[in-house]
Amino acid sequence: MSFIDNLKSFGKSVSTFLFGQSSESDHVNNMLVGIYPGGYGAPPTRGTRELLDAYNTMPWLRAVVNKVSRSVATTGWHLYVVSENGKAVKAANIQNANFEVRSRYLKQQNNIREITNHPLLDLLNTGNSFMTGITVRQIIQVYLDLVGEAFLLKERNKAGVPIALYPLPPDWVVNIPTLDYPVFRVSFRGFDEEIPASEILWISDPDPRNPYARGSGTARSLADELETDEYAAKHTKSWFYNKARPDLIISADGLTREETQRLEQDWINKNQGFFRAYKPYFISKKVDVQALNQTFENMQLVDLRKYERDTIIHVYGVPPEILGIIESSNRATIEASDYLYSRWVIQPRLELLRSYLQERLVPEFDDRLILEYDNPIPEDKEYVLRAAQASPWSLTVDEWREMSGHNRLDNDEGKVYPLPYNMYFARNFGYTSNSNNEASDSKTKEKEDMEALAEIIREIEELDESNTVKGGEE
């Protein structure tokens, strides 16, 4: 924090001490206190544990959430810092900018350098003693997509610096902090403890009904669709267990109990088994045989499950091609799906995660640091190729080789530009002084040659004229 920031903070503290809080702050405090008059914060939303269990039992929910969370988790993270006059400074305009603006700053400004070795990077990449960094980041996103919130318990070293993050299932956190009681209450099995708010990082996708309470995940809005698909799957399973219902009902008038039992036994003996299939069965009395047929086609069970599947993946915004559903796809839609998935599914989730890490975790190390993630959006190769073809001399040979999948040339031989003078190669882009001189010398020599040729032609013409005159005189 700079001297000016410290001075502003000190002035604000003195003003609050002398004159008290403003009326606006009083209104805010009164509202926050009034939301939870009992002191304790909100408990988990009803159905939280069931949604977490659904990740293990509902296949399409698992497929979508696992795909998205794995994509978010495998994205790399970087740290940058802005320097002025050799000293690191805080650049809030870059820290709080969106991804496009941050990327432009980080690429264009020479006073920004990347930090490759830092405890914060170790914290994000190593996870904890039970999980890798990727696993921790994945479970964070799983919690956010299912129930809309994730809790990370911080482990600190003797210096008070966070060295590990332990994800807590949202249903373990039975109370969240309030102004009167700023602690998290965590309870599971034999563990029940109140943990200070500073020791747990709470990442939340707020519920619009009460943004100061628990989060709201996408899966919560799909509760009915998820249960419908699950019941359809269970019905299909029960069909193979016969569902306590016979395939045939056989009845006949005038049969006694003993005759009915003999008919049943005779029917089974003559018709049951693979080698008795398609054989006729003869009987001397009128018997009524009624088949109880049930087909998935008549119930439209297949169409129902496809409809619920499509609803689930559309609500999450995942293109079907990403999950291998290519029933009505072609090459163009498959290639476009990768861009749509990265741009509108992965990047917004990374931005939400980064905003919490930048505002709530980075200041515990150094508030001048800028946290950034790798761009998940794939490069538009066709656009890059068209732009390069418009001015092929603007790229080096090495850059052209990389675009085609080849390695750079050794000894910097590929660091030349193919300039369009019948395509000669230059070390520097554009016209150099040597090339200008060479071009000037070439034009001068060409002019001299043309003048010499004209002089020769003129002498030949004069010689012809003199020979003609002499011939006439003779």
Image (cartoon, rainbow, N blue to C red):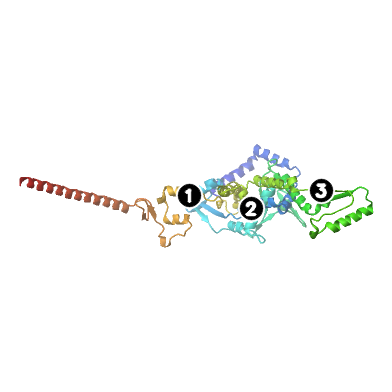
Few, some or many residues within 10 Å of mark 2 (<14, 14–19, 20+)? some
On the image, which quarter does residue 117 sit in? bottom right
**Residue 258 location in percent, x, y?**
94, 54
Marks 1 and 3 sit apart, C-alpha to C-alpha, by 64 Å
In this rendered view, identify the residue nearer to me: 411 or 144.
Answer: 411
Location of mark 1 (residue):
384
Location of mark 2 (residue):
67
Few, some or many residues within 10 Å of mark 3 (<14, 14–19, 20+)? few
- Indicate left or right for 388 with 213 as reference: left
Q: Residue sitting at 65 percent across and 56 percent down?
A: 136
Numbered disc 2: secondary structure: helix
Marks 2 and 1 sit apart, C-alpha to C-alpha, by 28 Å
- Indicate left or right for 417 with 121 as reference: left
Please tell me whether residue 106 is drawn above or below residue 34 in the rendered image.
below
In this rendered view, identify the residue nearer to me: 45 or 26.
Answer: 45
In front of the other: label 2 or label 3? 3
Few, some or many residues within 10 Å of mark 1 (<14, 14–19, 20+)? few
Q: Are marks 1 and 3 in contact (CB under 8 Å)?
A: no
In this rendered view, identify the residue nearer to me: 179 or 209.
Answer: 209
Q: Are marks 2 and 1 in contact (CB under 8 Å)?
A: no
Q: Which mark is residue 292?
A: 3
